[in-house]
Amino acid sequence: MKMKHTLYVAIVCAVLFTACKKEATTKGDTTAPTNGSTWVFKIAQFNEMGDTTTSQNTTLRAEEATVGGSTWLKLNDLSGQTKLLIQKRSDGWWYSNGSASSLWYKTSASVGDTYAYIYGTCTVKAVSSSLTVPAGTFTDVTHVEGHDTNSLEDEFWFTNSGSVLLRFDTYDAKSGQPEANVYRKESWTLVSYTR
């Protein structure tokens, strides 16, 4: 596994989906991100021992943009730098890094479903779990793992109501170890979301 797209993917995932409603218990798209939506994420980075090396908050704001003839939400940091693009489609939420796009969060998913994403294959691990992040405790959460060809790359937790990203973890290979021997390198957790 290469030194990852950590910050990029973290930002992408972090901004991609976030919920504004605590205790979301129904499926639907009632709190989906829109033009002007704002996310605040706590970003923590870790060493191979699991110790936190840095921790900070970052704010992302959605802005509608036409890309390739269709409407996307550009997720920009406060300096105006675009971190990723997201778009609601019939099969779920897609994201783009500017050069490629793929399904990120599949709506109406079942445990065990797989689908391609930019860095490999996503597998749905749970569809009605609970998760506590700084923004609160959320129920009816979908947990997805993203794998490249040989190891775990990313984990995502989305609300089923609104398909908002609650948490995003990215992994990297341990030094001098086989590629499949990974550690959690970075974690984004939702602090707040304003639709």
Image: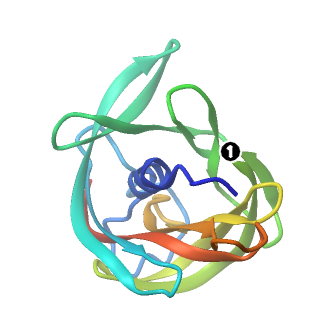
Percent coordinates x, y for residue 36 in the rendering:
23, 41
Percent coordinates x, y for residue 168 in the rendering:
49, 66
Amino acid type at circle 1 is Asp
Asked if residue 155 can be seen in this view, the reply is no
Above/below status of 61 relative to 42: above
Locate residue 24 relative to residue 122 in the image: left or right. left
Percent coordinates x, y for residue 158 in the rendering:
52, 66
Asked which quadrant contains residue 186, the reply is bottom left
Asked if residue 16 can be seen in this view, the reply is yes
Asked which quadrant contains residue 82, the reply is top left
Q: Which residue is mark 1?
A: 91
Asked which quadrant contains residue 175, the reply is bottom right
Residue at the top extreme?
69
Locate residue 33 relative to residue 81 in the image: left or right. right
Give the secondary structure at mark 1: loop
In this view of the protein, which residue sits in the foreground, 171 or 160? 171
In this view of the protein, which residue sits in the foreground, 114 or 83? 83
In this view of the protein, which residue sits in the foreground, 33 or 179? 179
Above/below status of 111 relative to 84: below
Count of numbered tags: 1
